[in-house]
Image (tube, helix red, strand yellow):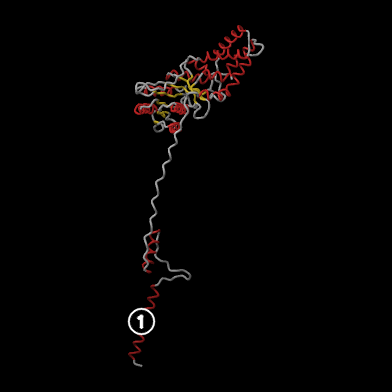
Amino acid sequence: MDITLIAAIVIAVVLLAVGGFFLVRTQRPVKPGKEEPGPETTGAAGATAVEEDRDRDSGTVRTPPSQAPPEAPAAEPAAPELETPPPSAGRMVRLRARLARSQSSFGQGLLNLLSSDTLDDDAWEEIEDTLITADIGVASASQIVESLRTRVKVLGSRGHDEVRALLREELLAHIRTDADRTVRTEPHNGRPAVIMVVGVNGTGKTTTTGKLARVLVGDGRSVVLGAADTFRAAATEQLQTWGSRVGAPVVRKEEGADPASVAFDAVSRGIEEGADTVIIDTAGRLHTKTGLMDELGKVKRVVEKKSQVDEVLLVLDATTGQNGLRQARVFGEVVNVTGIALTKLDGTAKGGIIVQVQRELGVPVKLVGLGEGPDDLAPFDPEVFVDAILG
């Protein structure tokens, strides 16, 4: 064999061996059972890139992904359906049965005592105690008993109908049927009537304000409400609910705002909108807290820079008895109370508080609450009240 040929073969073998060695060195080892990982991708963008590479290799033309339709805006909550409250006329008569159920034991007890065969000193003392227990007050109870005692003695008869008629006359005389119980809600001089609702905590001021608005709307009046109880956010929300039910706008501010400012703005809005009545719900306050009572006086003074205050209604809980009378005195000194709204008269309340409050303050009871329903606030009618008591 030619030496040149042998040398060429040796050189070729050496070159192949060296090339194979370098080829093996440049490849990464892969463990058995595992595939070589491809390039790392993250999210939808990476997945889309891989798919596009595969499509490019296969010659497939892909359509762009369809975009999801934009989300429709969230629907706003529907406005509450406006309610049509019943008119105030006849409310007391409609609630008469409820009043009779709560007060009948008091009236029937008196009638039974007065109709008994013997009316000695012990019997008259029991009659007086029954009147005092009903929160009529010691002075009024004494006067009623003395008058009844004299009239029964003169008449010499104690038939049930006669006794009932006598007792009815005495109770009506002490409840004062001649008192003006009109709640002044009529606009005047181109301005709305302004009503302030005051009282201690827990008597039902905000509820009474809302119910009074319903009474007025039921009578065809336009009303603006002022949420001047800025110490309790719940009171503002509660009044807003009452207003939205009957379409009465509510003037409100953030919690802790100046109550006088809210009251002033409410009256201003009432004037601008030509409303018939503006009702201002004030914060509950203990009658013993001088600072809070002074603030109540400030609310009234600020409102009077815009318009006169036609009514200051003091809300009293009929179940508080003597304590309610003490509350009424202090409020009367600060803001000149013009009328009483007596709440919770349908429960265990004793209606005699009406006689006592009016006697001590010279302020008439104008409204009574006879239940928890939205239309259970009624103008006070003394004759319906006494007839319900006596059955």
Q: Position of residue 210 (x, y in %)?
A: 45, 29
Number of labels in the image equals 1
Asked where in the image residue 16 lies, by quadrant, the reply is: bottom left
Q: Is residue 210 above or below residue 310?
A: below
Q: Estimate the x, y position of residue 197 in percent, counting from the top left.
A: 44, 24
Left or right, 232 with reference to 141: left
Determine whether 126 is above or below 207 in the image. above
Residue located 61% across and 14% down the image = 161
Left or right relative to 298: residue 386: right
Image quadrant where one finds the C terminus: top right
Is the residue 231 above or below the residue 383 in the image? Answer: below
Can residue 247 be seen in the rendering of this structure? yes
**Amino acid under disc 1:** Leu
Picture quarter with the N terminus? bottom left
Would you name the residue on which mark 1 appears? 15
Residue 89 or 39: which is nearer the viewer? 89
Please provide percent x and percent y for residue 38.
41, 66
From the viewer's side, name the closer residue of 86 and 199: 86
Q: Is residue 237 visible?
A: no
Q: Residue furthest bottom?
A: 1
Q: Is residue 49 above or below residue 261?
A: below
Q: Nearer the viewer, residue 56 or 320?
A: 56
